[in-house]
Amino acid sequence: MIATTNGTPVSISALGCHVPDRVVTNDDLAELVETSDEWIQERTGIRERRFARDDEALSDLVLPAARAALDRAGVRARDLDLVIVATVTPDMVFPSTAAIVADQLGASEAGAYDLSAGCTGFMYAIAQASGMIGAGLSRTALVVGADVLSKIVDMTDRSTCVLFGDGAGAAVIEPADAAGFLGFELGADGAGGVDLNLPAGGSRLPSSAETVAGGLHYVQMNGRQVFKFATRVLVSSAEALLERTGLAIEDVDVYVPHQANVRIIDHAVARLGIPKEKVVVNVDRYGNTSSASIPLALAEAVADGRVHEGDTVLMTGMGAGLTWASALLRWTATP
Ligand SMILES: CC(C)(COP(=O)(O)OP(=O)(O)OC[C@H]1O[C@@H](n2cnc3c(N)ncnc32)[C@H](O)[C@@H]1OP(=O)(O)O)[C@@H](O)C(=O)NCCC(=O)NCCS
């Protein structure tokens, strides 16, 4: 799906983030599996990540992020009419984490649901919220990208456990005076789903002693295939959206790619031809936080004064599904 927005301008009016306190360094992981700080930094660019405590669930990360975004936007929870939590690690299969969070925030007038699109979840969710607001179905939406992948990664599997981290990024999305979201490109290739999945615990393979013994309740990944997919779609999705919106790569002021791996980002940056100073990178400090990665990186860029009113922001996510999505946003928020 590729579309430019029309009608009511819609934008992000504020962002809020939260990461767990516990910092896990590469050296910490080298005590669990046969790896090294040098290998992880060279192959991924990651230096450290945050892991939730045993008693911390997704909603415990989402709530502070959501409250920070609402405070900054000057929006009361009861004025929200839509809450979307994009995640693959909800508190439990149901009820949705969005419903749990809406209740705890006091968002009593909001429809609330979780959205599953792997690491692309936040991007799909902002497209939905933008479309619903533009169509008059919603006025004030809270969109959260959040994951606690440390809970579903096998800490004895060195090919996955070094890559991921936990976090939450929230955005208040509302009608804007002008500009805001310019367009979206969303895609999915279900045939590639086998390259990044969590086989057990669904209706295909309900959890059992056997699935647990086989480690099928953990993330399974074909790293090389996912690497190839990621480098391809980061470029093709951005280029397709730029063409559709009539913009050139030179018009992009800030580029926020999914924070999976510095090598994947470097590859996309080189192919797209974006100057490095326009690229937001924080994967070194958080690892791949899945659905939280783009809002965390965007919020950090805003806090650092790197995003100014009127700037054109390009965001592209990709992940399990396999899925991908890009958005172009003319920045209107005054944080
Ligand atoms: C996972 C990834 C970092 C591996 O890097 P790579 O350069 O492709 O490495 P390879 O898979 O070719 O593995 C090379 C060797 O390193 C080993 N290795 C894997 N993880 C290791 C680790 N943490 N420490 C040390 N060695 C490791 C492998 O076992 C392999 O050894 P072998 O050649 O003896 O079999 C890379 O494929 C990647 O980033 N893929 C994308 C993953 C991703 O982003 N997923 C989420 C998308 S949202």
Image: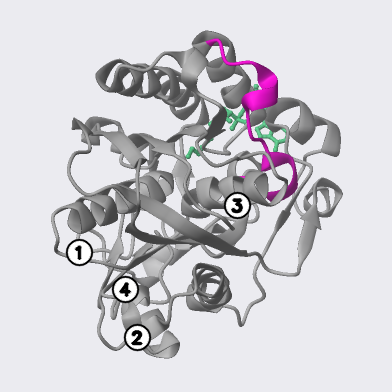
The image quarter containing residue 116 is: bottom left
The tag on residue 93 is 4
Give me the residue at 35% from left, 53% from top: 176
Q: Secondary structure at mark 2?
A: helix
Q: Residue at x 39, y 71 (%)?
A: 209
Which stretch appears magenta?
A: 273-288
Q: Which residue is mark 2?
A: 78
Query: Of discs 3 and 1, which sits in the foreground?
Result: 3
| Circle 3: element type | helix
Cα distance in 3D space between marks 2 and 3: 24 Å
User: Residue 164's x, y, as percent?
Assistant: 60, 49
x, y (%) of residue 257? 52, 33
> Nearer the viewer's eye, disc 1 or disc 4?
4
* Secondary structure found at label 1: loop
- Mark identifier at residue 286: none
The crowding category of the residue bearing disc 4, from other C-alpha atoms within 10 Å (few below 14, some 14 to 19, many at least 20), is few
- What is the C-alpha distance between the residues marked 3 and 1? 37 Å
Q: Does residue 127 appear left or right of residue 304 in this picture? A: left
Judge the density around disc 3: few (<14), some (14-19), many (≥20) Cα neighbours within 10 Å. Answer: many
Decide if ligand 1 comes within 8 Å of the CB at mark 3: no
Q: Is residue 78 above or below residue 296?
A: below
Q: Position of residue 166 (x, y in %)?
A: 60, 60
Sequence-earlier tag: 1 or 2: 2
